[in-house]
Amino acid sequence: MDKLEQIKIAAEREIKDASNLKSLEDLRIKYLGRSGELTMILRSLADMSLEEKKIVGPKAQALRMELDSMITEKNKKLSERKRSVLDVSRPGKKIKIGHLHPLSIVEKEIVDIFRSMSFSVIDGGPEVETEYYNFDALNIPKNHPAREMHDTFWLEKLGNKNERLLLRTHTSPMQIRYMETHKPPFQIIVPGRVFRYEATDASHEINFSQIECLMVGKDVNLSNFKFIIEEFFARLFKKKLTVRLRPSYFPFVEPGLEVDIQCVKCGGKGCNICKDSGWLEVMGAGMVHPNVLKAGGYDPREYQGFAFGVGPERIAMLKYNIPDIRMFYGGDLRFINQF
Ligand SMILES: [Zn+2]
């Protein structure tokens, strides 16, 4: 019995360590061959007493089977390794396909909420825009001080009709483009990328995104707007948040509003995110200026509407507690892979 135990320990280790088919075959001969160590014990059973046979026999047989299957198994492994690297019959490996960027996740969430409130999602529009659509049609005439609010990337090349071209500073040009070709009533959102010529810091980027919203009809008013955004923020942050409207100035709306929500982190008590004010500034909005409706081809005495722009970066920063807007475009995978 001691001898069987010794063979078991040694053989198991040696088979496990065998590094090629040749040494594995040597081991098979050493233990299970015609005069192998285990074979000799099995043979000696004939000379044992009945008592001994009963004890040693089954153990030796079991060990023989175990070693046999270990060798077969190991043989399979070693042969596989030996075969060509390209084995088309082997099962495929799963390819890492990545995942959505945090901004795409938030943009999709915002779009889904508006879509569920019957807004149509209008795709993009041109990122290279004319001076007319980006400024003039939106009630920002040349030499108007409001143009200073938009630090602009101007292009050297002129457009087809010799108009000045720029990288759009907001998604609002799409208001005009949409109105020119559609009849009210409608409610749309337009996600898109915009550009500002300015120094970057934790809250400013030269390229960022906006989601433009426009609702026009015969009796659209500010209380419609308030309902829509309250509903929007409640769904986005999954809790009822108090919304505050403050008077503000944007040339393309009258009256213009700055929209604050109750701080999503401290609930209004004051914290580092809201700079102890209890409020977070989240979007600019207002009733569409009569001049803008006219530029879109509508009679402002017949139609009115509201518009606002929301920034997915701002929302994502609040939602995920991201301290610096530059992280979205920095290309650092340690950041991206957290989403
Ligand atoms: Zn706070």
Image (cartoon, helix red, strand yellow):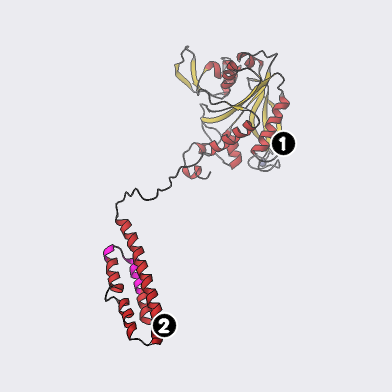
Give the vertical position of 280 relative to 78 (above or below): above
Give, as a three-letter code, the residue at label 2: Ile
84 magenta-colored: no
Secondary structure beneath dot 2 equals: helix
Q: Quadrant of residue 14?
A: bottom left
Residue 247 placement (x, y as % from top left): 70, 26
Residue 41, visible in the rendered structure: yes
Q: Image quadrant of residue 20? A: bottom left
281 sits to left or right of 128: right
Q: Tag on residue 285?
A: none
Q: Where residue 234 sits in the image (x, y, percent)? A: 68, 37
Horizontal and vertical percent for residue 19?
Answer: 30, 63
Q: Residue at x 29, y 51 (%)?
A: 84
Q: Quadrant of the N terminus?
A: bottom left
Say if residue 249 shows up in the picture. no
In the rendered image, residue 205, in percent from the top left (x then y), is placed at 52, 32
Q: Is mark 1 within 8 Å of ligand 1?
A: no
Q: Nearer the viewer, residue 76 or 118?
A: 76
User: Is 233 displayed left or right of 332 in the figure?
Assistant: right
Image height of 313 relative to 155, above or below: below
Question: Residue placed farthest to the top in the image?
Answer: 161
Q: Give, as a single range, the part of the protein colored magenta.
A: 10-22
* Prevailing secondary structure class for the magenta stretch in the rendered image: helix
Q: Quadrant of ligand 1?
A: top right
Check residue 242 in the rendering and tell me which mark sits there, or answer none. Answer: 1
Residue 55's label in the rendered image is 2
